Amino acid sequence: MTLNRRGFLAACSHAGIASALLPGVLYTLASRAQQAAKSDKPFQVTEEMLDQAALLADVPLTAEQKKMMLDGLAGMRESYEAIRKLNLPNSVAPALIFDPLPAGAKVDSERKPARWSKVSGIAVSGNLEDLAFLSVREQAELLRTRRVSSLGLTQMYLARLKRYDSKLHFVVSLTEERALAQAKAADAGIAAGRYRGLLHGVPWGGKDLLAVKGYPTTWGAGGFEKQQFDEDATVVQRLDAAGAVLVAKLTLGALAMGDKWFGGKTRNPWNPEQGSSGSSAGSASAVSAGCVAFAIGSETLGSISSPSTRCGDTGLRPTFGFVPRTGAMALSWSMDKLGPICRTVEDCAIVLDSIYGPDGMDQAARDAAFNWDAEFDWKTLRVGYFKKDFEKPEAPKLKEADAKETAEDKKKREAGNATRALNHEQDLYDWRYQTAALDKLKEMGVALVPMALPDLPYGAMTPLLEAEAAAAFDSLTISGRDKLLTEQGPGDWPNTFRKARFYPAVEYIQANRARTLAIREFSKLFDQVDVIVAPTFADQLVATNLTGHPALIVPNGLRGADAPRPLKSEDGEGDHDNVGGPETPVSITFLAGHYKDAKLCAFGRAYQDATGFHKLHPKLD
């Protein structure tokens, strides 16, 4: 009885089996049995395999059903292998296109000229490093008026990248030759009166999941160190067209997870003993350290939000579909977003203005307008906040000893209780910054409307990401090359990819149906308000990445010297990877409706101007 995927599905259907997991499990069991036997003959499915698969899939089978299925499996051809022989590259997207808009939603597609802020009085000394932490808007004015040259800025940033990389580990590849040529061309264009706009001559860095012709695109992962592509990513092409100067390809955790990559661990400039968080690790670290004027990151489930918070940057995760992802590594086709990491909100608006809009290749990219107006009256916006997320954290319930507790059990229990107590102490400390943000908004004249996050199981929908990621990197799992990835723990990609292969197709569809409810219910909130204020790491982070709503992450102060110190990692690599400790940044997040990114930025800019936290920079020397 040879095994065939397509035929087996039919046999399951005839036998009354509706689960899409059981066939895949059974196929895997039979395939492994064939491999173990080192046989080239068509592999066999047995009743024992059926029992094992049914147990894992939680599908009861009667003896009659098993006999019917076994009888229907004889002589059928394979189909898994037929698909695998296509050797689908990461760039090939599924035929299904995710749309974050609820039914009946309308999108403004009329583009209007951007209105940028006016700047003046920028001092220029003989030392160009004094300009390292200037905003893009300020650098643009100096370049436009030819008070500084693009070549000078580019050389300054290249020098800083080289100097601080040994400390922060944020560079995968310097694009020095390309950058110097671009800078010279930018200066010549400006001198000839061919000024392209605010990014003309401004040096930037890109997360190394963006393809750049002539340079490796490593995805931060072992086994991909020499990978190259023949075309630039759309975002890179658009920034080239705007006159921006690419100085470096910056680190990301392997295949966009965390801050550990094949070359080490990217560090937080505020506390180099700590990772910069991920996965836009190098982008956030380099911006924070004043080593690029801005960077491009990406977010699937926190990869702009988390490192922007850790490094004290301003990060914009645009509405899903605003920025085309052509030429960027795919992790989850229905959740990946590209966005800017900068020093100011208006810098994010400047960058987004150059990279958004359809490119004819990313079918999820929508024709929507981003109309920035620096003079927009943000006081006309209705503002809500997730009331529950700003309440004082409750003390955790500590585990008590039981009569059967061993000495080893006691040790583990006490360690767990100590961790829970410290986490609570840290939450209490950071809660003060969250409530201070609300107080500041009230001081600004904002009438905050209390709101509640729709009560839906957002966490239960996140296996969608894992299933898509497992498909994106299917060849790694099948070939065994996943052993080359840096991290191999229970929560890392190799194990996650393997687990995701047992996620039922039916449950994937059901989770997407639940996601439709989430989009519908979350979108209703923006019928009541224009902007919502939320802690960055509250439940909204998962919810809005699933619903595709935009998020703006802005600095919200520095923890004081009295802040609880993080736990030390067991591996001795530095501070515990969760939260900061003394003199490290905190953030606050603003949310808005789909494609309302311009209004979102207008409000965030007002808060940023009122607080000034974005002007704080780490001491690197």
Image (cartoon, rainbow, N blue to C red):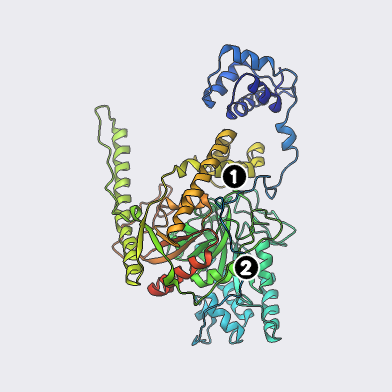
Q: Nearer the viewer, residue 302 or 481?
A: 302
Q: Nearer the viewer, residue 381 or 208?
A: 381
Q: Dot 1, how many residues are within 10 Å of its Cα: few (below 14), some (14-19), or many (20+)? A: many
What is the secondary structure assignment of the residue under circle 1? helix
Say which of marks 2 and 1 sits in front.
Answer: 2
Q: Are marks 2 and 1 in contact (CB under 8 Å)?
A: no
Q: Which residue is mark 1?
A: 469
Q: Nearer the viewer, residue 303 or 388?
A: 388
> Seen from this angle, which residue lies furthest front?
104
Q: Nearer the viewer, residue 463 or 65?
A: 65
> In the drawing, what numbered circle is on residue 368?
none
Tell which circle, 2 or 1, labels the residue nearer the N-terminal end. 2
Query: Can see residue 166?
Result: no
Please tell me whether residue 331 is drawn above or below residue 353 in the rendered image.
above
Residue type at mark 2 is Glu
Image location of residue 416, percent across then percent down:
32, 42
Q: Is residue 284 left or right of residue 484?
A: left
Q: Quadrant of residue 249?
A: bottom right
At horizontal 53% and vertical 23% (from top left) the residue drawn is 59
Please tell me whether residue 199 is drawn above or below residue 433 in the rendered image.
below
Mark 2 and mark 1: Cα distance apart in space: 35 Å
Q: Quadrant location of the N terminus?
A: top right
At horizontal 58% and vertical 33% (from top left) the residue drawn is 506
Q: Is residue 578 left or right of residue 351?
A: left
The number of callouts visible is 2
Q: Quadrant of residue 312?
A: bottom left
Residue type at mark 1 is Ala
Image location of residue 498, percent across then percent down:
57, 36
Q: Which residue is mark 2?
A: 110
Q: Quadrant location of the C terminus?
A: bottom left
